Amino acid sequence: MFLWVADEDPYAGPPLRTPLLDVEWWDAWRPVPFGRDARQRRIDLPLVWTSLLVGAIPRQGKTMAARLAAGGLILDPHTRLYVFDGKGGKDWKAVEDVAHRFVCGDGVEHAEAVRDYLVELVAEVQARYARMAELDDEVCPESKITPAISRDPVLNMPITAVIIDEVQVFLENPTKVLVGGKKTTLGEYIVDLLAYLARKGPAAGIVVILATQRPDSQTIPSRLRSVLGSRFALRVMDWRDSNIVLGEQMNTRGFDASALLPNHKGVGILRPDGDTDAGAESLAMTVWTYYMANPDWQAICARGRALREAAGTLSGHAAGDDTTRAIDSAAVVKALGPGSGDARQVELPEPLAAVVRHLGDGIGEREFVPTAELVETLEIEPSTFARQMGELGCRPVRQYVPTEDGEARRVRGYLTADLRAAIKQVDDEINSTADAEADQP
């Protein structure tokens, strides 16, 4: 065992300014300077090949963390930026002079613009895969984008980042729309588009960065969360919200963002998708993010525009062109796969969702499942598991089960009938909410 002990608060004192302020430009293929750990080791955040979810309660540094990740991309003139701000304030105003697509606001027209730009980008991903399939093996050896491909103006496949602050504003939009002949909501359609980009986009050079002050299972559905590679949780309200951001059962492994202190602004738990200077063996780590004051943020955005003007890569909104190209909407809907447009997909809370995944078809075939089996499989602390399941209405019982020697032993566990009842209750609550929203004028 290795133990490191600090003799003073490692997160006290003034924050450190971002190293991005001291560089003329940045290579998007390099991890972005993100912050320092308790031992003052620099933590760089890989962005290419992955995606990022930032979650926190208000005024804990969520937007700052997202802007730090965006800063390195802004300083690479060969990247293309889709920036959508659901807050509608000034936090992202400076990036308007750099962004290829830009939306700022929380109205229906803003959500519709986000949808249109995401549809455009899904079609772009499809087109990139088609073009990469025709390239020579020496240029594109693995059907994945390379640094050379991303910087070739003829191929036109730059690293492209989708950055959405207050993403819940767009994901919860209740406006009714038709997608592929199915009725759904605008928010659900945006969820499907983002899930596709996070799942299929990385190999084509797409980076998705989402930030929210409402990290719950209804706002960020599991079909989207599960494909977001890197996670950063600043202080949240309770362990459930922490697990929504960092991943299921992370609190039982010692990573709970609800335990962070209120006075530690900008301090969060990072679960990176890739190696960091803190060691590739680290599942997650506590990081104090760098600081980027508004004048510094504006200076980085201004430098990003100057770099693009010099390289001839300024495009879209920043160049005065907000028109979207014609696309095959049917092809986009088909690419999203079965279930797209279905607003009533059931998102089960944890740890019930993990139990259901473990049992599979057995939830309808088995009568009883021992607690020991679930605790071992899910790698969760028994008392924590019992408390969480109790909060979902599932109480353990004692049943006799056969042993290997033919005897019967009485053990604690859960009736699958109780598990199915809990699933039905969640389903009924979701459908009741959806019906109530549908009845509203």
Image: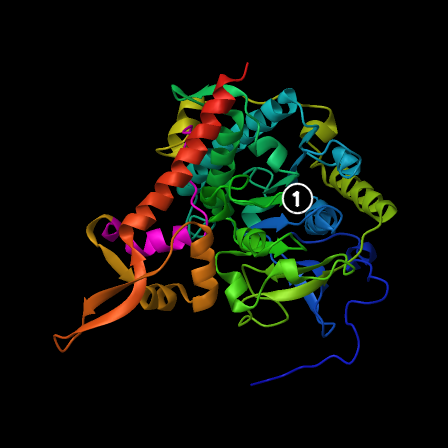
Q: Position of residue 39 (x, y in %)?
A: 72, 75
Classify the position of the N terminus by image quarter. Answer: bottom right
Q: Residue at x 77, y 57 (%)?
A: 265
Q: Which residues are magenta?
A: 341-363
Q: Nearer the viewer, residue 207 or 66?
A: 66
How far from the left and from the top, in percent, is residue 429?
44, 35
Image height check: is 377 above or below 407? Answer: above
Label 1 sits on residue = 213
Return the x and y of residue 23 as percentages of the image width and height: 79, 56
Residue 349 drawn in magenta: yes
Between 81 and 428, the residue placed more toward the observer is 428
Q: Residue placed farthest to the bottom in the image?
A: 1
- 181 in the magenta segment: no
Q: Quadrant of the C terminus?
A: top right
Q: Is residue 218 above or below residue 6?
A: above
**367 with respect to 101 (left or right):** left
Where is residue 146 shown, x and y percent of the image? 53, 51
Q: Is residue 343 visible?
A: no
Which quadrant of the view contains residue 2?
A: bottom right
Task: Tell me the residue at 32%/49% (across/down).
Answer: 418
